[in-house]
Image: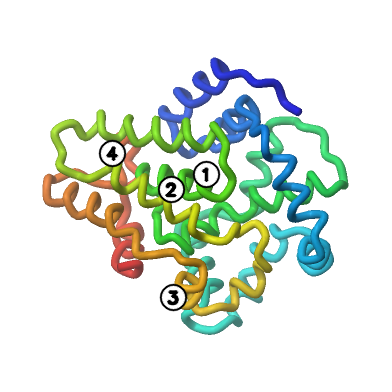
């Protein structure tokens, strides 16, 4: 079990604020704030009949998630189509997330724990699709707090809520309901079945709106309200941290998710 190092976590959080695209800091934060209940969650899934079935049919997700040629054969309004659109528009890949995690230099073991850890990591970008939260600063905080609702850890709380407070500081004077947005994301994560324990390929084949209904994922009303308020105030939701990440494609994403 990694050692509990809150000061190290705080250091990497500050570094993450400088460049939210440097995902390796996220992994370092979680490494520094290990969850006491993580082992129990690993056992609950991996030692169950469903966990055993998932290991047989989905032993490794990156290869499945990066096979866009296959995913593009899925129905028009499926989760798979939205996932491919998102990953291609953002220039992301499941393999890229693996590479970021590998920067930690951790030893790898072909065991149940490793399978669970990797599965939780590999479903992160899928959460953006299911929840409707973008890759803007607020969207990332919302996804992390959604994840805390599913897999509680101090790392999620630190990045999610401290990140939200940083956004409030950056947009001082704005009427955007930032804290309402992140709290809604947290509640949604609690109400949603744990994504890590679901058959991902079956989920990808499901109509996106049907999947959201089945998983108790509502419209992210307060998140959308924040974007609307910011735009009315002349603030670019995708450039709040001053990193010039705004793009026409991101505007298109908001329209398609509305």
- The alpha-carbon separation of the residues under discs 4 and 2 comes to 22 Å
Tell me whether the residue at label 1 lies in contact with that at label 3, contact meaning CB atoms closer than 8 angstroms.
no
The residue under label 4 is: 240
Tell me whether the residue at label 2 lies in contact with that at label 3, contact meaning CB atoms closer than 8 angstroms.
no
Q: Which mark is residue 186?
A: 2
Q: Which mark is residue 209?
A: 3
Tell me whether the residue at label 4 lies in contact with that at label 2, contact meaning CB atoms closer than 8 angstroms.
no
Tell me whether the residue at label 2 lies in contact with that at label 1, contact meaning CB atoms closer than 8 angstroms.
yes
| Residue drawn at 39 percent across, 30 percent down | 162
- The alpha-carbon separation of the residues under discs 2 and 3 comes to 20 Å
- The alpha-carbon separation of the residues under discs 4 and 3 comes to 29 Å
- The alpha-carbon separation of the residues under discs 1 and 3 comes to 23 Å
Tell me whether the residue at label 4 lies in contact with that at label 3, contact meaning CB atoms closer than 8 angstroms.
no
Tell me if residue 102 comes above or below residue 225 in the rendering: above
Tell me if residue 127 comes above or below residue 114 in the rendering: below
- At label 1, counting other C-alpha atoms closer than 10 Å, the crowd grade (few under 14, some 14-19, many 20 or more) is many
Q: Where is residue 255 in the image (x, y as percent from the top left)?
A: 29, 67
Numbered disc 3: secondary structure: helix
The residue mark sitting in front, 4 or 3, is 3
Numbered disc 4: secondary structure: loop
Q: Where is residue 253 in the image (x, y as percent from the top left)?
A: 35, 63
Numbered disc 2: secondary structure: helix
- At label 3, counting other C-alpha atoms closer than 10 Å, the crowd grade (few under 14, some 14-19, many 20 or more) is some
Q: In which quarter of the image is the N terminus?
A: top right
Q: In screen coordinates, is 189 left or right of 57? A: left
Figure quadrant of residue 32: top right
| Residue drawn at 24 percent across, 49 percent down | 226
The residue under label 1 is: 148
């Amino acid at each position: 079990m990694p050692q509990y190092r809150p000061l190290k976590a705080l250091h990497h959080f500050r570094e993450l604020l400088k460049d939210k695209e440097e995902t390796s800091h996220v992994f370092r934060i979680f490494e520094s704030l290990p969850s006491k209940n993580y082992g129990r969650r690993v056992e609950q899934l991996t030692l169950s009949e469903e966990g055993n079935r998932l290991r047989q049919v989905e032993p490794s997700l990156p290869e499945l998630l990066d096979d866009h040629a296959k995913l593009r054969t899925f129905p028009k309004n499926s989760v798979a189509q939205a996932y491919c659109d998102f990953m291609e528009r953002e220039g992301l890949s499941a393999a890229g997330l693996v590479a970021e995690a590998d920067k930690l230099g951790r030893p790898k073991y072909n065991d149940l724990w490793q399978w669970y850890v990797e599965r939780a990591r590999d479903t992160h970008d899928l959460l953006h699709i299911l929840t409707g939260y973008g890759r803007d600063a607020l969207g990332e905080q919302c996804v992390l707090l959604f994840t805390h609702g599913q897999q509680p850890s101090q790392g999620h709380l630190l990045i999610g809520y401290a990140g939200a407070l940083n956004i409030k500081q950056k947009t001082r004077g704005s009427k955007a309901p930032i804290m309402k947005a992140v709290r809604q994301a947290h509640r949604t994560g609690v109400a949603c079945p744990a994504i890590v324990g679901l058959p991902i390929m079956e989920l990808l084949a499901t109509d996106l709106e049907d999947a959201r209904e089945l998983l108790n994922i509502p419209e992210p009303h307060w998140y959308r309200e924040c974007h609307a308020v910011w735009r009315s105030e002349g603030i670019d939701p995708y450039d709040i941290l001053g990193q010039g990440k705004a793009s026409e494609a991101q505007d298109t994403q908001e329209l398609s998710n509305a």
